[in-house]
Amino acid sequence: MSKPAVTVELKRDEKTGGVGLWGLDLSGPVYFANFAVKPMDNVEIAGTPIPETPAADGTVMSWQVSNSFDRKSVDGTSMLSKDMVAGLTYQTLAAGKTGMTNLARVQGTAKDKEAVFAKVIINSESDQTKKFEFGFSDMATVYLNGQPLFSGSDRFSSRDYRFLGTVGFYDTVFLPLKKGDNELQIMVTEIIGDVGGWAVQGRFEDMSGLKLQ
């Protein structure tokens, strides 16, 4: 073929690298045949990627992401106290065009350091409850002002045997916001060795009376 069947947008600058083949064995063996790689100089990228759908209004486009820590240190607690997060440091991480935020850009995983907090400050004009849709990989616990409201898993095959662990707006929580600043923290855990990546995304269906910091 002179025109590629699939073209994707590269998320990093072009540089020398390698190529490999991997088959996800869901229903039987995978075979590759007649495959060849030829080194080339002055490579030109062929094809044009399909533009990604931009994030909808109300999408969180920037998160404060903590350094990684052992999720067992806070997992299952009835309240997220200041002492539990006192030693954490945060850095700003922008989301991609669609709103998905690649946590691996700022953090790596290791034994007993497989979780981070992604947080955003929500300023509410009044006491009100707002619908918040979100997605993550692999596991997440949602806290609002220290109070846990949700815990779930989107690991590979967690929903059924065909689920690939992809990140989508599959989950919803209703946030009981108080007037003024509210701290939304999502503890996102990456299961080392699992298929997939490490990400979070979130959006409000209705932004009336809200500002994101």
Image (cartoon, grey):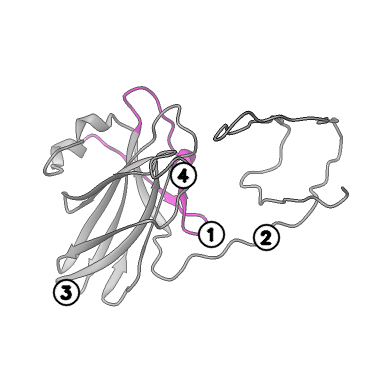
Q: Residues within 10 Å of mark 2 (few under 14, many from 20)?
A: few
Whether residue 47 is in magenta: the answer is no
Q: Is there CB contact under 8 Å for labels 2 and 4?
A: no
Q: Secondary structure at mark 3?
A: loop
Does dot 1 land on a helix, a strand or a loop? loop
What distance separates the C-alpha of mark 2 from that of mark 1?
13 Å
| Image position of 153 (left or right of 99) | left
Mark 3 sits on what residue? Answer: 126
Q: Quadrant of residue 126?
A: bottom left
Residue type at the position of mark 1: Lys
Task: Give the magenta part as a residue range.
Answer: 87-114
Label 2 and label 3: CA atoms lie apart by: 41 Å
Q: Tell whether label 1 touches label 3 (CB within 8 Å).
A: no
Of the numbered discs 4 and 3, the one sitting upstream in the chain is: 3
Q: Which of the labelled discs sits on residue 163, or is there none?
A: 4
Residue under the image location 40 percent in, 58 percent down: 169
Image quadrant containing the C terminus: bottom left
Q: Which mark is residue 50?
A: 2
First in sequence, mark 2 or 4: give its number: 2
Can you tell which mark lies on residue 97?
1
Q: Is residue 31 above or below residue 212?
A: above
Q: Is residue 21 left or right of residue 47?
A: left
